[in-house]
Image: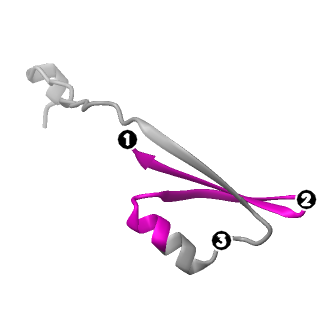
Amino acid sequence: MSNPTDSENVQPPMVYVGESIQWEYKQLSSDTPPTEDTLNELGKEQWELCAVVASGEQFITYLKREK
């Protein structure tokens, strides 16, 4: 069996690059972490949860969605 690079012109794979995605961000502050119902309502508006961070007595919720 021969090595393909010896006998053939091997082409690299084709890579297609689409348009870059632009994001919109939202930050919410609350005394309690977001509830499942709250997150589901935000999800219906296409918001995606990125993180929930406890900062002192506050919970900061970070969300993003495609513009």
* Residue pictured at 18% horizontal, 30% vertical: 14
* Residue pictured at 44% horizontal, 49% vertical: 65
Q: Name the image colouring.
A: one colour
Q: Secondary structure at mark 3?
A: loop
Q: Secondary structure at mark 2?
A: loop
Query: Which tag, 1 or 3, sits closer to the chain's start?
Result: 3
Task: Tell me the number on the disc at residue 49.
Answer: none
Q: Disc 1 marks which residue?
A: 67
Type of amino acid under label 3: Pro
For marks 2 and 1, give the CA distance: 32 Å
Q: Disc 2 marks which residue?
A: 56
14 vs 25, left or right, is left
The reply to whether the magenta stretch includes residue 48 is yes
For marks 3 and 2, give the CA distance: 16 Å
Type of amino acid under label 2: Gly
Magenta region's main secondary structure? strand
26 vs 30, left or right, is left
**Which percent across, then down, holds residue 54?**
81, 61
15 vs 25, left or right, is left
Mark 1 and mark 3 residues within 8 Å of each other at the beta carbon: no
* Residue pictured at 9% horizontal, 23% vertical: 8
Residue 13 sits above or below residue 47 on the image: above
Magenta-drawn segment? 41-67
